Image (cartoon, grey):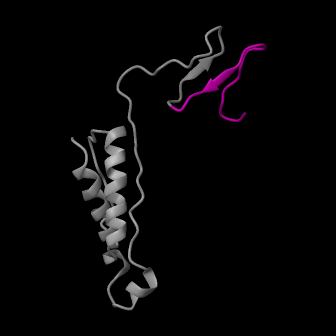
Amino acid sequence: MRGMGRAKEGSAVTKSVDGADRGSGNDSTPKEPKGPRLRVLVVRHGVAEDPAAFAKSGRPDAARPLTKAGRRKMRQAARGLACLVPRLDRLATSPFARTVETAEIVASGTTG
């Protein structure tokens, strides 16, 4: 495979996500990288107002908020997410209203 490096005959070399070459010795378990690991969690915004209906208001799409049901569903999802990921070190969002609302809901259910 391109970019994977050359393997000696009879041995396999794979490139892990962190870019380190991994040999195929007797131990088939991948080696854990040394040092802190970066874990990224991507969350899509909750259900927002209908784009076509909101456009009739004359306001920009960036101002389109979550619906009442969208906020409720995101609170439920955030509670479940907090069980899996109880702490967030950073939370980033676009400036769109619906993404900021979503981030605030997610942040309210975690520590950090």
Can you give x and y, in whole percent of width and height, for residue 92 in the image? Answer: 31, 53
Q: Nearer the viewer, residue 12 or 112?
A: 112
Most prominent secondary structure in the magenta stretch?
A: loop
In the displayed image of the protein, which residue is found farthest to the right?
A: 9
Q: Is residue 9 magenta?
A: yes
Question: Based on the displayed image, in which of its 4 quarters is residue 33 positioned?
Answer: top left
Picture residue at 65% right of the left edge, 8% below the top: 26
The correct choice, above or below, for 33 with respect to 112 in the image is above
Q: Nearer the viewer, residue 60 or 103?
A: 103
Q: Nearer the viewer, residue 43 or 108?
A: 108
Can you give x and y, in whole percent of width and height, for residue 62 in the image? Answer: 34, 75
Q: Nearer the viewer, residue 17 or 106?
A: 106
Q: Quadrant of the N terminus?
A: top right
Picture residue at 61% right of the left edge, 10% below the top: 27
Residue 43 shown left or right of residue 112 in the figure: right
Residue stretch in magenta: 1-17
Q: So how many labels did they put on this image?
A: 0
Picture residue at 31% right of the left edge, 77% below the top: 63
Picture residue at 29% right of the left edge, 39% below the top: 86
Residue 64 shown left or right of residue 8 in the figure: left
Question: Based on the displayed image, in which of its 4 quarters is residue 93 positioned?
Answer: bottom left
Question: Based on the displayed image, in which of its 4 quarters is residue 61 positioned?
Answer: bottom left
The correct choice, above or below, for 86 with respect to 35 in the image is below
Q: Quadrant of the C terminus?
A: top left
Can you give x and y, in whole percent of width and height, for residue 45 in the image? Answer: 39, 62
Q: Is residue 53 magenta?
A: no
